[in-house]
Image: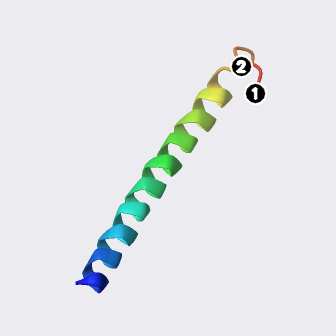
Amino acid sequence: MKILQCTIQKRRNKDKNEIIHIFKKIKMVLCRLKPRARPGE
């Protein structure tokens, strides 16, 4: 039971990390497309 819960938790973390990674990629592309329109980062 505990092992199963741990596996589910790891899978959730992996999904979250992938989503964050995708968002970072999109941000990078947007920054590259609009280098001037960049709010103070």
How packed mark 2 is, by other alpha carbons closer than 10 Å (few <14, some 14-19, many 20 or more), is few
Element type at mark 1:
loop
Instruction: Nearest to the eye among marks 1 and 2: give it.
Output: 1
Rendered position, 21 above or below 3: above
The residue at 66%/20% (across/down) is: 34
Labels 1 and 2 touching (C-beta < 8 A): yes
Rendered position, 8 above or below 29: below
Q: Could you tell me how many numbered marks the image carries? A: 2
Image-based side of 24 in relation to 14, left or right:
right
Image-based side of 24 in relation to 10, left or right:
right
Instruction: In this rendered view, identify the residue nearer to me: 37 or 3.
Output: 3
Looking at the figure, which quarter contains the N terminus? Answer: bottom left
Q: Which mark is residue 38?
A: 2
Residue 33, quarter of the rendered image: top right
Question: Residue 30 at x, y = what percent?
Answer: 59, 28
Question: Residue 37 at x, y = what percent?
Answer: 69, 14
The residue at 26%/80% (across/down) is: 4
Rendered position, 14 above or below 33: below
Label 1, label 2: how far apart the Cα atoms are = 7 Å
Residue 36, quarter of the rendered image: top right
Image-based side of 36 in relation to 23, left or right:
right
Question: Residue 39 at x, y = what percent?
Answer: 72, 18
Question: Residue 15 at x, y = what percent?
Answer: 38, 58
How packed mark 1 is, by other alpha carbons closer than 10 Å (few <14, some 14-19, many 20 or more), is few
Image-based side of 3 in relation to 13, left or right:
left
Q: What amino acid is found at the position of numbered circle 1 in the picture?
A: Glu
Looking at the figure, which quarter contains the C terminus? Answer: top right
Q: What amino acid is found at the position of numbered circle 2 in the picture?
A: Arg
| Residue for badge 1 | 41
Residue furthest front in the image: 2
Q: Which mark is residue 21?
A: none
The residue at 42%/62% (across/down) is: 13
